[in-house]
């Protein structure tokens, strides 16, 4: 209780009002998607500081305590392209300006933080689906941070606690735990520990 | 129903262009699902059976064709599908038949300069800056095609790539600057 009061004091009256508005908006989204078919499930404290647009026939699950922020005029956009599409977003994610377009499976772990980025498991959304085979899934581990303007395409697997730097391009890439991946397309993800050591030496 | 409304919008736009905007010529069967904005003094030619869409879930973006010079030329072939594409021509942009463009941009000049006297670069030539896209090219979302690039038939530009050099026919390119994938 004391912690909660402390947090309220930190936020101040305007911050508190903003948070309550976001909470109400999130509740509205939750109820709206629950009423419209139940294909989209959103966990309860869902802070919608920005707009969340979820379209398509597939299944979308968003965990508890997630937040959507308005980042470069864009909130969260999720588009599922087929009935088999599954988008799973873990607990405590901070999604700002993320666009997810899925025909197969897209999984975000808990506490994923994103900037304006594109997560898409098909190369062309509106091309005939027969041209490409079944898309390979995109799996993001826990505590992953996606930089601004990064593009994540099919077959990308990012293990927990990794960072994808701004403007990078991943396709069929594999990033291990605690790594920093950068480049377009990404090359040789380096362990963050090593980078900090190099910094200290220089 | 949506198709019918799109066809109606397309034919209305065609009539409007025939009456008031003589620099725009549009073939039969244009479908406009989301706003199409054609501006500028240059010439714009759109082939038969083209369709213009917006990206689903993104209401802010629409297709823009803009010419910034009276001598500029944009030619779009038949059966092209433009999903919120942005095309900006100072010289010449030719797009083949059956092209798919998603939320991508084409520009054939560097006129977006911070300094005012460099706003229209004087050293740009028409034959060096013209952009050509072949038949059946697909361009992924958030990618960009820069000046002087020609893309071969049935080539693919993956999402998020910046194309600075020519692309061979039938190949796939990705990254910044875009390179061919193995």
Image: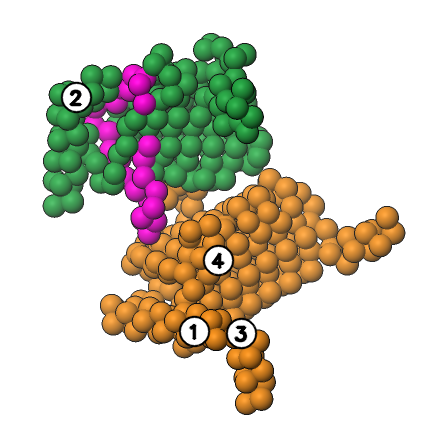
The N terminus of chain B appears in which quarter of the rendering? top left
| Residue at 57 percent of width and 76 percent of height | A10
Q: Colour of chain B?
A: green
Question: What residue does disc 2 label?
Answer: B20
| Position in image of residue A148 (x %, y %) | 55, 49
Magenta stretch contains residue B149 = no
* In the rendered image, the vertical position of residue B77 relative to residue B71, given as above or below: below
Within-10-Å neighbours for mark 2: few <14, some 14–19, many 20+:
few
The C terminus of chain B appears in which quarter of the rendering? top right
Q: Which residues are magenta?
A: B40-64
Q: Give A15 or A34, whichever is nearer the viewer.
A: A15
Chain letter of disc 2 in the image: B
Question: What residue does disc 4 label?
Answer: A96
**C-alpha span from label 2 to label 1:** 51 Å
Marks 4 and 3, the one that precedes in the sequence:
3
Question: What residue does disc 1 label?
Answer: A17
Q: Is residue A173 visible?
A: no
């Amino acid at each position: 209780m004391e912690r909660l009061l402390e947090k309220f004091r930190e936020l101040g009256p305007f911050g508190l009002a903003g948070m309550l508005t976001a909470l109400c908006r999130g509740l509205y989204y939750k109820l709206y998607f629950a009423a419209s078919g139940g294909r989209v499930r959103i966990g309860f404290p869902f802070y919608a500081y920005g707009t969340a647009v979820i379209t398509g026939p597939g299944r979308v699950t968003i965990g508890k305590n997630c937040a959507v922020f308005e980042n470069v005029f864009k909130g969260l956009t999720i588009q599922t392209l087929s009935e088999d599409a599954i988008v799973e977003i873990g607990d405590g994610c901070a999604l700002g300006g993320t666009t997810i377009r899925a025909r197969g499976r897209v999984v975000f772990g808990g506490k994923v933080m994103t900037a304006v980025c594109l997560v898409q498991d098909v190369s062309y959304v509106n091309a005939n689906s027969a041209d490409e085979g079944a898309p390979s899934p995109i799996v993001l581990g826990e505590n992953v941070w996606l930089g601004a303007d990064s593009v994540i395409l099919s077959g990308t697997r990012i293990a927990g606690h990794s960072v994808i730097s701004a403007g990078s391009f991943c396709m069929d890439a594999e990033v291990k735990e605690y790594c920093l991946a950068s480049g377009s397309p990404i090359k040789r993800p380096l362990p963050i520990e090593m980078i900090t050591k190099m910094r200290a030496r220089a | 129903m949506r198709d019918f409304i799109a066809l109606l919008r397309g034919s209305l736009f065609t009539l409007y262009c025939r009456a008031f905007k003589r620099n725009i010529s549009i073939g039969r069967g244009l479908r406009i699902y989301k706003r199409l904005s054609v501006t500028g003094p240059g010439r714009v030619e759109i082939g038969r059976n083209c369709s213009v869409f917006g990206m689903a879930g993104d209401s802010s973006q629409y297709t823009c064709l803009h010419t910034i010079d009276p001598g500029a030329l944009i030619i779009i072939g038949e059966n092209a599908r433009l999903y919120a594409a942005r095309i900006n021509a100072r010289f010449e942009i030719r797009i083949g038949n059956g092209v798919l463009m998603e939320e991508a941009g084409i520009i054939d000049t560097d006129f977006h300069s911070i300094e005012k006297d460099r706003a229209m670069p004087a050293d740009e030539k028409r034959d060096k800056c013209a952009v050509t896209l072949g038949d059946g090219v697909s361009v992924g979302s958030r990618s960009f095609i820069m000046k002087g690039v020609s893309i071969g038939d049935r080539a693919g530009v993956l999402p998020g790539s910046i194309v600075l050099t020519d692309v061979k026919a039938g190949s796939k390119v990705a990254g910044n600057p875009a390179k061919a994938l193995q």
